[in-house]
């Protein structure tokens, strides 16, 4: 049989160069692929290049894909684990925090507080139990720039509660667990106190280790600041007399008009706040005590501020309403003299203002320690009356002191008396006669001291001499 020439030619001329490595120039790591009349070199898996020995050949690839994949897998796995652990941690912490708040709430008498509030008519409207989160947010997490003041019992912060009301939040330092019930009773009583000269207690928070108290915010600072640290441009004698009368009235209310008598126990100028109209408001009831209706005194650990502290209470631990009377007497001396109750920089006999005031009255030189503006603006009758009242308040035996009601009535009566026009006219005539009298008395040496008399001269202050007769001005009674 004769073969076709074309078929014969194709079979004879079809050469497979890939069979013999010497017939191709493929790299040892390349794969030779035969094609009609030629061949191709392709690098094996894991190698890269053109596959030719006379070219780039085949270079082994460093495989990074498994490493990257493993790394990414481990990273995502670790991240997922970390997120899961974090969520679990915060979930556990949140539960612990909630349980801790519940513990503090019960420990601080929260259930008793709710019971007391609900049992008092209108209690739910007049007071509120705030959450810890509310007060934390209100104070911007108790930021330093929100601090209004620091005292012996804690720190007071300015806050804004959800209804946009500005409040003062008191964060106490200590809490006696044995007095929880008494504390709750006092909070409930104080939320019901309604007097224009008492800072209103709006509510409390019992979810913290130490309960937080929420008061109304009073904008113009403390009386102490205005007496001792400001220019006193507004603090005239009339303003001082008004503030004294308002404070005395509020203390009298706490002692007798409240549902249960309340002894403040820390009356001082730093606890008398002034609102935007400079109206006095007594504050800081952290040391206050309720007095049972059938008792006139309670025995307590001595608390208070040196310089204002009742000596009898200090020695006997017997707290009575008259302890507040003594402290208020010290505030009156501050208003009259502009001096601090205690000052170690002053001479020995002047360091304790209360003692120095009584001594000055006894030695008939009271006007030497009064603030010049007080002497200028107050009449002799006013200053004499208030000084005698101070003397009674500062009696060492509490039974000899007046009640706060008597003090308030006397101060208010003095204010009303001075409002009559004829009183001012008489006061001006008295001032003129005193100036004339001073000229004739300059030659005398006993009981003479320089005091500013009148603001009506061209220099603004006239210096003159007063002669004070101990029998007609201040009786020379020994201080008790």
Image (cartoon, rainbow, N blue to C red):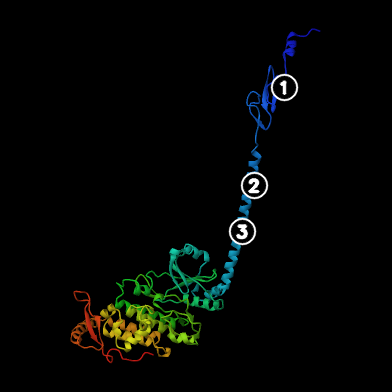
Residue at 31 percent of width and 71 percent of height? 231
Residue at 37 percent of width and 85 percent of height? 355
Residue 45, image x and y in percent? 68, 31
Q: How many marks?
A: 3
Determine the CA span between mark 1 and mark 3.
Answer: 68 Å
Residue linked to disc 2: 74
Local secondary structure at mark 3:
helix
Residue at 49 percent of width and 83 percent of height? 291
Up-down relation of residue 299 to residue 18 (above or below): below
Left or right position of 317 against 12: left
Q: Earlier in the sequence, mark 1 or mark 2?
A: 1
On residue 285, the disc is none
Q: Earlier in the sequence, mark 1 or mark 3?
A: 1
On residue 89, the disc is 3
Which residue is at the far right?
A: 1
Determine the CA span between mark 1 and mark 2.
Answer: 46 Å
Query: In terms of image quadrants, where is residue 358?
Result: bottom left
Q: Viewer-nearest of labels 1 and 2?
A: 1
On residue 21, the disc is 1
Local secondary structure at mark 1:
helix
- Mark 1 and mark 2 residues within 8 Å of each other at the beta carbon: no
Q: Viewer-nearest of labels 1 and 3?
A: 1
Left or right position of 330 against 202: left
Determine the CA span between mark 3 and mark 2.
Answer: 22 Å
Residue 324, image x and y in percent? 42, 83
Quadrant assignment for the C terminus: bottom left
């Amino acid at each position: 049989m004769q073969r076709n020439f074309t078929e014969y030619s194709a079979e004879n001329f079809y050469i497979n160069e890939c069979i013999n490595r010497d017939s191709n120039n493929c790299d040892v790591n390349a794969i030779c692929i035969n094609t009609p009349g030629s061949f191709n070199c392709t690098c094996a898996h894991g190698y890269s290049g053109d596959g030719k020995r006379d070219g780039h050949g085949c270079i082994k690839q460093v495989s990074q894909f498994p490493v990257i994949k493993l790394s990414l897998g481990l990273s995502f796995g670790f991240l997922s684990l970390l997120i899961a652990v974090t969520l679990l941690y915060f979930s556990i912490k949140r539960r612990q925090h909630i349980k801790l708040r519940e513990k503090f709430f019960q420990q601080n008498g929260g259930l008793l507080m709710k019971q007391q509030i609900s049992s008092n008519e209108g209690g739910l409207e007049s007071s509120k139990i705030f959450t810890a989160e509310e007060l934390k947010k209100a104070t911007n997490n108790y930021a330093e720039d929100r601090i209004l003041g620091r005292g012996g019992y804690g720190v007071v912060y300015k806050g804004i509660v959800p209804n946009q009301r500005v409040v003062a939040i008191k964060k106490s330092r200590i809490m006696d667990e044995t007095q929880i019930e008494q504390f709750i009773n006092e909070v409930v009583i104080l939320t019901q106190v309604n007097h224009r000269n008492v800072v209103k207690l709006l509510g409390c928070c019992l979810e913290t280790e130490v309960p937080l108290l929420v008061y109304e915010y009073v904008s113009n600072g403390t009386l102490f600041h205005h007496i001792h640290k400001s220019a006193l441009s507004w603090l005239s004698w009339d303003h001082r007399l008004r503030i004294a009368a308002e404070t005395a009235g509020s203390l009298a209310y706490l002692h007798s008009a409240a549902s249960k008598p309340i002894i403040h126990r820390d009356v001082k100028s730093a606890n008398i706040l002034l609102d935007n109209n400079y109206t006095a408001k007594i504050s800081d009831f952290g040391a206050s005590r309720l007095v049972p209706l059938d008792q006139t005194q309670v025995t307590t650990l001595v608390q208070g501020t040196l310089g204002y502290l009742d000596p009898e209470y200090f020695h006997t631990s017997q707290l009575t309403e008259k302890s507040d009377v003594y402290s208020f007497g010290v505030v009156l001396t501050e208003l009259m003299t502009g001096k601090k109750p205690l000052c170690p920089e002053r001479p020995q006999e002047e360091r304790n203002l209360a003692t120095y005031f009584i001594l000055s009255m006894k030695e008939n030189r009271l006007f030497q320690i009064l603030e010049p503006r007080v002497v200028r603006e107050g009449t002799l009758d006013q200053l004499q009356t208030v000084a005698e009242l101070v003397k009674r308040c500062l009696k060492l035996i509490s039974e000899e002191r007046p009640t706060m009601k008597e003090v308030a009535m006397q101060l208010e009566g003095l204010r009303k008396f001075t409002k009559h026009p004829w009183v001012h006219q008489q006061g001006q005539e008295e001032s003129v006669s005193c100036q004339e009298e001073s000229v004739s008395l300059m030659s005398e040496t006993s009981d003479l001291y320089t005091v500013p008399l009148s603001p009506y001269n061209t220099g603004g202050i006239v210096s003159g001499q007063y002669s004070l007769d101990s029998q007609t001005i201040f009786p020379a009674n020994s201080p008790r």
